[in-house]
């Protein structure tokens, strides 16, 4: 591992979200997306796949997260086969929920929100289709496919074509794929450069896209370069979320070792970043108040 950088084994753990009503949220997270209810009580619901918790819903938000609010843009659950994405698309289509679908060239994605306005992405990575990224003199970004064609990265996804991956049986799996995982967290931001200084310079993520023209910045590891992202697409319409709104409570970063966690804690102290140690975890917040919890991966 390079000094001061997180190892490629770093991954994201459970993402905790505030909601106005847990039963209403479960109609999306459990009944449509197919996550299993793996725990909880009167004020929380833990949802996951393959016995692992991916999402934790917390009751108590008083208002839904308004559109174009700073904070959560979406949390992305990644699946490992295109057929798994097709099953998710079929479930969304049958649900009657409003959803969208985009072809990012490096991935194919489905988008929906729960009743509290928390954005959700179901994503299938397609790195084999991507050749390179080109940035013009004016900062515009184009994605070049393996066949040499240029793409915006925001093209509509051919959902009927995706659904053909299910064949003619008509069978749709009701559950999320067991090997699904939290692939990235995407936030709306006011000052992405300042956030990148924190996530890269202090925490130790590697920078990836940094483009005000495209309106997105992100960082990750050598293995997964897109793990935490920030966009400024709302521009001057970006608003602060109202008090007690739904949205991101905190997300989890799982590090490879106790030594790596200790090194991050030292960097947080040196940067005078707010942090506290609770048990075997370190809790902190980025410069815009998004909270995260750093832990050591369980074997």
Image (tube, rainbow, N blue to C red):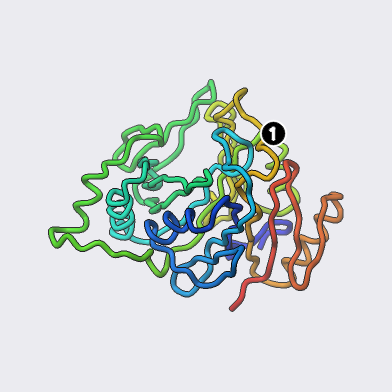
Q: Residue furthest top?
A: 138
Query: Left or right: 248 with respect to 119?
Result: right
Residue sitting at x 69%, y 36%: 193
Q: Which residue is tagged 1?
A: 191
Question: Which residue is more in the foreground, 88 or 1?
Answer: 88
Above or below, 138 against 123 in this view is above
Residue sitting at x 67%, y 70%: 296
Residue sitting at x 25%, y 61%: 172
Categorize mark 1 by other alpha carbons within 10 Å: few (<14), some (14-19), many (20+).
few
In which image quadrant can residue 139 be found? top right
Residue 201: x and y in percent read 74, 48
Residue 1: x and y in percent read 66, 63
Query: Left or right: 140 with respect to 107?
Result: right
Question: Which residue is more in the foreground, 217 or 33?
Answer: 33
Above or below, 201 against 137 in this view is below
Q: Secondary structure at mark 1?
A: loop
Quadrant occupied by the C terminus: bottom right
Question: Which residue is more in the foreground, 173 or 272?
Answer: 173
Above or below, 140 against 131 in this view is above
Q: Residue furthest bottom?
A: 299
Residue 166: x and y in percent read 21, 58
Q: How many marks?
A: 1
Residue 198: x and y in percent read 73, 46
Residue sitting at x 49%, y 58%: 23
Question: Which residue is more in the foreground, 196 or 62?
Answer: 62
Q: Residue furthest left?
A: 168
In which image quadrant can residue 153 be found? top left
Above or below, 140 against 10 in this view is above
């Amino acid at each position: 591992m390079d000094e001061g950088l997180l190892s490629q084994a770093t991954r994201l753990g459970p993402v905790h979200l505030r909601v106005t009503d847990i039963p209403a949220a479960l109609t999306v997270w459990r009944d449509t997306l197919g996550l299993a209810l793996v725990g909880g009580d009167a004020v929380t619901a833990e949802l996951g796949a393959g016995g692992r918790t991916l999402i934790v819903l917390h009751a108590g938000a008083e208002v839904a997260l308004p559109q174009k609010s700073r904070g959560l843009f979406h949390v992305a659950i990644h699946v490992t086969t295109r057929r798994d994405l097709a099953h998710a698309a079929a479930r969304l289509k049958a649900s009657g929920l409003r959803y969208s679908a985009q072809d990012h060239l490096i991935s194919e994605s489905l988008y929906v929100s729960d009743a509290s306005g928390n954005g959700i992405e179901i994503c299938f990575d397609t790195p084999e289709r991507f050749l390179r990224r080109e940035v013009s003199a004016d900062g515009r970004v184009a994605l070049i496919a393996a066949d040499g064609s240029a793409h915006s990265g925001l093209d509509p996804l051919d959902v009927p074509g995706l659904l053909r991956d299910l064949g003619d049986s008509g069978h749709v799996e009701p559950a999320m794929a067991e090997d699904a995982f939290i692939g990235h967290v995407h936030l709306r931001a006011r000052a992405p450069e300042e956030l990148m200084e924190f996530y890269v310079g202090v925490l130790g993520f590697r920078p990836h896209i940094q483009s005000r023209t495209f309106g997105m910045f992100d960082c990750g590891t050598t293995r997964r370069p897109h793990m935490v992202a920030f966009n400024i697409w709302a521009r001057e319409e970006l608003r602060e979320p109202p008090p007690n709104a739904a949205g991101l409570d905190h997300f989890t970063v799982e590090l490879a070792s106790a030594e790596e966690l200790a090194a991050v804690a030292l960097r947080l102290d040196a940067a005078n970043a707010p942090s506290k140690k609770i048990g075997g975890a370190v809790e902190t917040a980025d410069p815009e108040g998004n909270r995260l919890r750093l832990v050591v991966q369980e074997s």
